[in-house]
Each structure stands twice: as structure tokens, then as C-alpha cells.
Amino acid sequence: MHLLHYTLWALAGKSVQLKMDDYRRTLPMSRVKSRGPRYALALVVLCSLFGGPALAQEASSDSAGTMQVEVSVLQEVVRIDESGREIVEHKPVGLVTPGTILAYTLHATNTGDGAVFDARIEDPIPHGTILLPDSVDVDDLTITASIDGGESWKSFPVFVATGTDAAGQPVYQQAPADSYTHLRWFLDGPLPPGATKEVSFKVQVR
């Protein structure tokens, strides 16, 4: 069993480390008052699993609300049933070897009294793994991605120039799966009190 180590940094300057062995934890966001009429919320969570994915979420609220983020990781297992069909199941993470597929789900819940606006979920791809682009949960959300360590962002899926055609025009192809370094989801519109938004993606261990 691998252990997850989370470190929280809040705008207030405080930090706390949470050690988890169950791959699942609710992470409260600290609230810090901004210059304007709203409260600014910020959270950075680093998790060391195979070198670590990290989650960064920023949001603003029109009242003394808080956001909570729950991160779960499951291992994808394929078995053959009695009729010979392949059945895909998701189970707690066990023995991990090259080729193992891990499914990440991020649950963002507004636990406050007011709506949260402009929420953003940002997650680096775990070291030692490759993103499976077709697994990224789009769900009518605005999604951007980075292939250069977060230095620049483009619409997901990312297309890169690979040369020029006979007319001298650039030719674009989708970026290789192993080039993705970060994903970012924008939660369009306000998130009402008590509402939860989930985003997910899968990676394959190198």
C-alpha cells in the first residue's frame, strides 16, 4: 500500500501536512478576506504518489463560504467473466506495475453559505505516469492543458505544429500523450452552496 502525503498552503501563510493511507480525504480550504467585497480562497495540495500529482484550486465566494476538495485514486482492473467478456472494474490501489491504469477523481464541494465563482481546478500529471487523453472528463467544461511544465496553456486537447504542407502552411497534430504535464478545469458559472462538481482523468504507469 502506497501512502499519500498532502501538504496544504493557504494564503494566510499556514501549512499543515496530512498523511493518508486510504487514498481518500476531504480537504478544507482556508478563507482569506480580499480587498473587494468577496473572499478569496486558495489551496495548493501536493501528493506524492509515484513522484506526486498536485492539485491547485482557486476560487472566490460572495460570502463566508468554504470549498472542500476530495481526491480519490482507484486502480483499473480488467477481468474476464464466465462468458469470456472483458469487465473493467475500479478497486483500491494494490500492486502497481508498468502498464497499471490509475483513475483520479477530484470532488469539489461548496460547503459555505454563498455561491463560489470562477473556481479552477489544476492538476499536474503524476511523475512516472502518462495521461490517457481520452479519459479526461470534459463534461461541457472549459479545459486547458500544458505540455511544458505549466509555462504555457492551450485548449485541451493540445495540438502542436509538426511541419508545413506543400503550400507552406503549418501542419498540426495532437500532442503525444506522454507530453502532457498539467490539466486545468474551469468551473463555468457559480457553484451554489451544497453543490459538488467532479472532474476525472486516468493515467498509465510507465
Image (tube, rainbow, N blue to C red):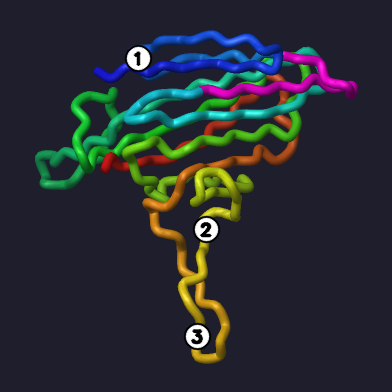
Q: What is the distance, in whole Å, between disc 1 and disc 2 at their CAs? A: 33 Å
Compared with residue 106, is residue 162 higher up or lower down, i.e. above or below? below
Q: Provide the residue span drawn in magenta.
A: 31-45
Q: Residue at x 73, y 35 (%)?
A: 118
Alpha-carbon span between mark 2 and mark 3: 20 Å
Q: Which residue is mark 3?
A: 165
Check the picture and name the quadrant holding the C terminus: top left
Q: Residue 22's mark?
A: 1
Callout in the foreground (1, 3): 3
The answer to whether residue 145 is left or right of residue 31 is left
| Mark toward the viewer: 1 or 2 | 2
Residue 80 found in image quarter: top left
Q: Circle 3 sits in a helix, a strand or a loop, which is it?
A: loop
Compared with 114, 142 (above or below) is below
Disc with the residue nearer the chain's start (1 vs 3):
1
- Which residue carries the number 2 mark? 158
